[in-house]
Image: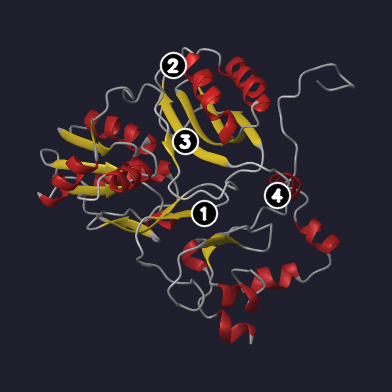
Amino acid sequence: MDPNTGKKNMFNKLSKEQGLKLLEQEGFERKTISFYRYVIIDSPYELRDELYESWKDLGVLGRIYLAHEGVNAQLSIPESNFDEFVKLVHANPFFTHMPFKIAVEDDGNSFFKLTIKVRKQIVSDGLPIDEYDVTNVGQHLDAKSWNNALEKGATVVDMRNHYESEIGKFKGAICPDVETFKEELPEVKKMLQGKEDEQILLYCTGGIRCEKTSAYLKHHGFQDVSQLHGGIIDYARQLDKDVTLNNNFVGKNFVFDERRGERISDDVISSCHQCGEPFDTHVNCGNVNCNLLFLQCDSCKEKYENCCSVECIEIVNLPIDEQKKLRKGTDNKKMYYSHKRVNLNLNKKHD
């Protein structure tokens, strides 16, 4: 309750630094999970307020998106409160029998505050809501069935962005060179043209993007569409439970939290964007006005001041007041450097 207004506080205004400091002071273990569901939610704002109140009291941290089409959640819960959290979730009529995906690697520092936002879609595809039936989805395959389909030569498609697939992917997968899911749907349909009668396998981090893609492809005439149940996260957990299963995923699974990735195999399939040495951990550019997510090894991080380009190095060396001025005003639009524009010749320009 806000003492000044008497209204409930539904937003966590902690800075990242404040949140991480509080995490360091915790004397208990946390469990990182994720879940999603496509379900019609008539009043997502009311549900947001309800969830925030109840989850905040359990010490839940994370990032949750609600929309009329459903929910997409990535969370960190104190282990001592986990059973109570599960009961609370399953008691909600929108979340009955909700399956949870539990992180493969978990240091308890995946999230530093609780944020629940209402969006137009839980996964933005840029299409009208009546473009296709999001509930008419393909078949879900467990790890064993997935491996069998791979061995039989099914076409497998990575439904993630290119910066995710660059550090880890299934062997033989088609990996679209896109930055957003919105770009990916039409691109995948184009890439699969002529395969409408063949078996198509889709995978992503936890399954939510594949769910929507399978419905989209079925709407456009693809007859045999399947997706990896629970995504890469659950695939890895199934491998741990059944040692007879072969691991067909190489590298890391990119995750959208402070961990940045979970190692699924020991393979390092990507390289530092600046020196070319094998490396597969993403960082954000030190210029907050750029904030590019890219691959930078520890050596280059020190050498180039955690920056992606010469321009960004120059900006981070300006006085703080000057940096702030660059972020103000409509004429000073936010700087973004494409992943393809990370300057591989930075050595020559900066030395």
For mark 4, give the secondary structure.
helix
Discs 1, 3 touching: Cβ within 8 Å: no
Amino acid bearing label 2:
Ile
Discs 3, 4 touching: Cβ within 8 Å: no
Discs 3, 2 touching: Cβ within 8 Å: no
Amino acid bearing label 4:
Glu
Question: If you read the primary sequence from the N terminus, does the residue marked by circle 1 or circle 4 appear first?
Answer: 4
Amino acid bearing label 1:
Arg
- Please tell me whether residue 328 is drawn above or below residue 305 in the rendered image: above
Q: Report which residue position mark 1 lands on.
A: 260
For mark 3, give the secondary structure.
strand
Q: Report which residue position mark 2 lands on.
A: 40
For image coordinates 69% across by 57% down, the residue present is: 288
Q: CA distance from mark 1 to mark 4?
A: 19 Å
Sort mark 1 into few (<14), some (14-19) or many (20+) by Cα contacts within 10 Å.
some
Q: CA distance from mark 3 to mark 4?
A: 22 Å
Q: Which label sits on residue 34?
A: 3
- Please tell me whether residue 216 is drawn above or below residue 343 in the rendered image: above
For the C terminus, the quadrant is: bottom right
Q: CA distance from mark 2 to mark 1?
A: 31 Å
Question: If you read the primary sequence from the N terminus, does the residue marked by circle 2 or circle 4 appear first?
Answer: 4
Q: Nearer the viewer, residue 219 or 55?
A: 55
Q: Is residue 222 visible?
A: no
Q: Nearer the viewer, mark 2 or mark 1?
A: 1
Q: Point out residue 140 in the picture as x, y percentages from the top left corner.
A: 25, 33
Q: Report which residue position mark 4 lands on.
A: 24
Q: Nearer the viewer, mark 1 or mark 4?
A: 4
